[in-house]
Image: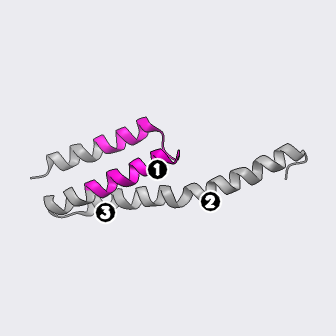
């Protein structure tokens, strides 16, 4: 437990930000998981579009770094292109 007033404020701010960021991160992870579970290339393509949208939203809200988002999207694109 913080003894200094500014430290107590930082704890509260961190708690609020964590609560705000958690559902966004979860949405990104869920969309990536749905992409990975797609059975056909058409399903994967649709899931890919949704995953890219959720990743871009996370970047715009400051939850993900733009390079991390680019890396995730690139990884998904490589998997999509490798499908038969």
Q: Main secondary structure of the magenta part?
A: helix
Marked residue nearer the N-terminal end (1 or 2) = 2
* Residue 26 sits above or below residue 5 on the image: below
Specify whether 70 is left or right of 19: left
Q: Are marks 2 and 3 in contact (CB under 8 Å)?
A: no
Specify whether 16 is left or right of 26: right
Marked residue nearer the N-terminal end (2 or 3) = 2
Residue labelled with disc 1: 58
Does the magenta portion include 66? yes
**Residue 75: image location, x then y, percent:** 29, 43
Q: How is the image coloured?
A: one colour
Q: How far apart are the alpha carbons under marks 1 and 2?
A: 14 Å
* Residue 40 sits above or below residue 75 on the image: below
Which span of residues is magenta-colored? Answer: 48-74
Assess disc 3: are there few (<14), some (14-19) or many (≥20) residues with their C-alpha within 10 Å of its C-alpha. some
Residue in the picture at 22% in, 43% down: 78
Marked residue nearer the N-terminal end (3 or 1) = 3
Residue in the picture at 53% in, 44% down: 62
Residue in the picture at 27% in, 47% down: 76
Q: How far apart are the alpha carbons under marks 2 and 3?
A: 23 Å
**Residue 36: image location, x then y, percent:** 27, 58
Q: Which mark is on residue 34?
A: 3
Residue labelled with disc 2: 19
Front-most of 79 and 21?
A: 21
Q: Residue furthest top?
A: 67
Does the magenta portion include 59? yes
Assess disc 1: are there few (<14), some (14-19) or many (≥20) residues with their C-alpha within 10 Å of its C-alpha. many
Disc 1 secondary structure class: helix
Residue in the picture at 20% in, 56% down: 45
């Amino acid at each position: 437990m913080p003894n200094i007033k500014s430290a107590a404020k930082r704890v509260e701010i961190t708690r609020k930000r964590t609560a705000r960021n958690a559902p966004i991160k979860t949405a990104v992870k869920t969309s990536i998981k749905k992409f990975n579970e797609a059975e056909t290339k058409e399903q994967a393509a649709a899931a890919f579009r949704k995953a890219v949208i959720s990743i871009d939203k996370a970047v715009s809200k400051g939850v993900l770094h733009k390079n991390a988002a680019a890396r995730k999207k690139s990884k998904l694109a490589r998997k999509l292109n490798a499908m038969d």
